Amino acid sequence: MTASDRDKILRGLDEIERMIESGKFIWRADREDVHMNIEAALTDMIGEPAKKLHTARSRNDQVVTDLRLWCRDAIDGILTRIKQLQVALVKLALKNEGLIVPGYTHLQRAQPVLLQHLLLSYVEQLERDAIRFVNCKNGLNFCPLGACALAGTGLPIDRHMTSDALGFTAPMRNSIDAVSDRDFVLEFLSTNSITAVHLSRLAEEWVLWASEEFGFLTPNDSVSTGSSIMPQKKNPDPMELVRGKSARVVASLVSLLVLCKGLPQAYNRDLQVSPFIRKATCTLNGDPWHFLEPSIVFNNKKKSGPADKSIGIILRLGLAYKVGSCDACFQHPMSEQEDKEPLFDSVKTIKGMLEVTAEFAQNITFNRERIQRSLHAGHLDATTLADYLVKKGVPFRTSHDIVGRAVAFSLSKGCQLCELTLGELTSINPVFDADVYDFLGVENSVEKFCSYGSTGLERVAAQLNFWVNTLNIDSHQEP
């Protein structure tokens, strides 16, 4: 390629970019997709040199390169939202210092725990989600560009240069694998699904806690709804929607797994079916976007990260182009991509779930009096009483049996363990002494927990301090 042809192609692509950003570019149905639209428009504009644009390229490697770039940016957006939810949960924990709640196993009363401890358990889950997203991003950050249709090219291209320019770790080693691989999408959807399950579990717990049967939390009016017929209703609808949306995210993973399970190497039409055209209509405000090939919908989102820095390179490779963020939905003419639709839907949904959960967490109140009244039921201090006997030298299995008899006795009397007299306790086993009452009652029980990661006051304070520092939260400000 001569320097003159190169300069004409670059100037032409710059002009096409400006036309797209201004909404003046005309998308033609007879030109099949974004690639052919841009190449044909460039040919109309500069003539013969434009026919060199597609040298050593195939839509197969261009599309999957673009998809990896999109996934990379999408993961960054999800990670931001995970941190926002973690911050909301830690601040909620800071507001509820010292509040003890019933801990449950099998949805039955088990042991007393600090509410802070419970809230931080969800922060831990989200941190594992974040680690999975980071690993997913690192795993997909290899460049397929230059693999062409499947066999590579006989032309002396520099795949390492384009890989570096686009912010990838390295070019993919095998050209057949490069164009056929969708493992990175499956891993992304799997990570989304695990995160969605975590959010659904949190949502389920808060829906239960907002019920009259529990009454442990009250959502503000801004995050609750009423009923068209029952005037007393105050429903935690956002959490019900989060719980429901988790099914959609999991379904996207299953959809793509089933799609991929019968595909031979390399590229297959299964990944691109039923071509149709969508009209491109939008209002642009100039915010930078790079276009991603399959029927993507933009809604007022700004890009960040390596892809922004390499937008000119992406454009010049014919992979994509910049558009402004749209005030209205913006859809381009192209084929519906069977592997992309579940991906885009999954990402959109998980982002929404994270945002809604964070907003809900900022607008709920835990009902201290109701919770404290509920602590008297269920003999939550029974295990701590067994620990007391172990410290007295009684084998745990024997201690378990002794405390079981003490619980049965207190049930027969209609009282709590801490309300049994010392004489009643010693009648069950003479090992009991006056110091037993230091282990009875939920407050004493929580104070006795001391193992690493436990619900003891000092242990939870250490956990909370770790997350305050990790998330850079100012604990001196009002949460």
Image (cartoon, rainbow, N blue to C red):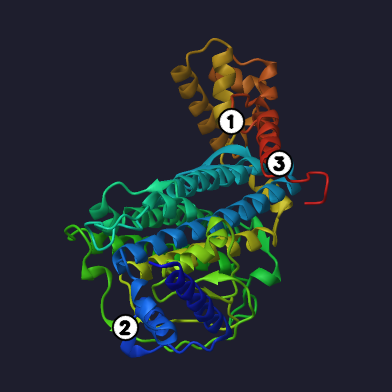
Gap between marks 2 and 3 measured at Cα = 53 Å
SS assignment at label 1: loop
Residue receiving disc 3: 468
Is 229 or 355 nearer to us in this picture? 355
Compare marks 3 and 1 and give the one earlier in the sequence.
1
User: Which of pointers 1 and 2 indicates the residue nearer the eye?
Assistant: 2
What's under tag 2, amino acid-wise?
Glu
* Mark 2 surroundings within 10 Å by alpha-carbon count, few (fewer than 14), some (14 through 19), many (20 or more): some
Left or right: residue 340 compared with residue 447: left
Residue 443: horizontal and vertical position, in percent? 70, 33
Please give the residue where the numbered disc 2 appears in the rendered image. Answer: 32
265 sits left or right of 136 in the view: left
Number of labelled discs?
A: 3
Task: Judge the density around disc 1: few (<14), some (14-19), many (≥20) Cα neighbours within 10 Å.
Answer: few
Secondary structure of the residue carrying tag 2 is loop
Q: What amino acid type is highlighted by mark number 3?
A: Val
Residue most extreme to the top: 393
Distance Cα–Cα, label 1 vs label 2: 58 Å
Dot 1 corresponds to which residue?
453
Q: Secondary structure at mark 3?
A: helix
The image position of residue 244, as x and y in percent, is 45, 66
Whether residue 291 is visible: no
Q: Is residue 291 above or below residue 382?
A: below
Q: Are marks 2 and 3 in contact (CB under 8 Å)?
A: no
The residue that appears at 46% across and 72% down in the rendered structure is 4
Residue 364 appears at what percent x and percent y?
A: 68, 60
In the rendered view, would you say 38 is above or below 425? below
In the rendered view, tell whether residue 296 sits above or below residue 380: below
Q: Residue at x 70, y 51 (%)?
A: 92
What residue do we see at 39% from left, 65% from top? 343
